[in-house]
Image (cartoon, rainbow, N blue to C red):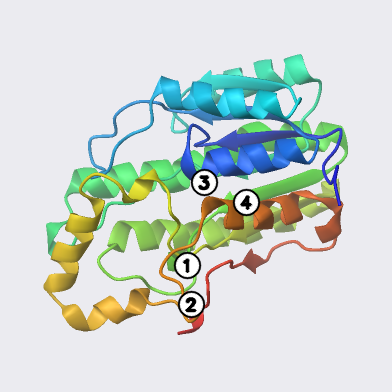
Amino acid sequence: MSGRVAGKVALVTGAARGQGRADALRLAQEGADVIVVDVCAPLPSVPYDSATPQDLRETVRQVEQTGQRVVPAITDVRDLEKLRSVVDDAVGQLGRLDIVVANAGICVPKSWDQVTPTIFEDTISTNITGVWNTVMVGAPHLVRAGGGSIILISSAAGIKVQPFMVPYTTSKFAVRGMAKAFAAELGQHNIRVNSVHPTGVNTPMGTGNMAAELGAAIAGYERLGAMFMNMLPVDITEPEDVADTVLFLASDESRFITAHEIAPDAGVTEF
């Protein structure tokens, strides 16, 4: 099957690399033009390497190889007015918007008593406010297009508690609820809203000091380390695996699916 989102335009945030790049590329491979947004700057709280403008240019290069149009923008999803400006401009260039993938997010593993106010605020503002901003600037274009699909990237931590990540788990449960709330009100415009809940994914979020930080937290209470175990015999999934779920929710194959949580999670939320 090919051309599953042919003629459509998608907005993907956090698209410079990793999961966002995989989502943008998969949608382009199936016929969508894409708007790719990323902050492309250091994020002080995170223990892993931040995305760069060079990363975003590589996403653009890979999308262009599919033959689809791509409009990049460097902006912080926490800045509502700047995000609205770049999305409105990009939609003006591409003519419409049909799909919104709110993927941008951060994760800072710490035991509860090591979480600073800065870590909490950075996580909440990026993972909740940034997702809300993305829907608020994208949804009006979907209304004008006569419908579409909004996909909020949550996490297994938005279904089952993941320890040593209090701000992250809080934010991802909020994203799950946000999807259901938006789905209720946007349904009248033929707009579907769903959340996606992956297990651990092999992306740059696992680079830098990420593994060491998580390992240090688990060492403080090793019993909870088992909560990260997948039911299927895999330790980690690939971003392309999650991108296939995003494509399904973006396509007409899921035209009657809304207000749901879809979990390509290798069974971690049931184990």
Marks 1 and 2 close (CB-CB < 8 Å): yes
Q: Position of residue 259 (x, y in %)?
A: 69, 63
Marks 2 and 4 close (CB-CB < 8 Å): no
Find numbered disc 2 in the image and state the secondary structure of the residue it sits on: helix
Find numbered disc 1 in the image and state the secondary structure of the residue it sits on: helix
Nearer to me, 75 or 199: 199
Residue 3, compared with residue 179, is above or below; it is: above
Quadrant where the image shows the C terminus:
bottom left
Marks 4 and 1 close (CB-CB < 8 Å): no
Q: Residues within 10 Å of mark 4 (few under 14, many from 20)?
A: many
Nearer to me, 29 or 223: 29
Relative placement, left or right, of 210 versus 151 is left
Q: Position of residue 163 (x, y in %)?
A: 29, 71
| Mark 1 or mark 2: whose residue is earlier in sequence | 1
Identity of the amino acid at label 4?
Ala
Marks 1 and 3 close (CB-CB < 8 Å): no
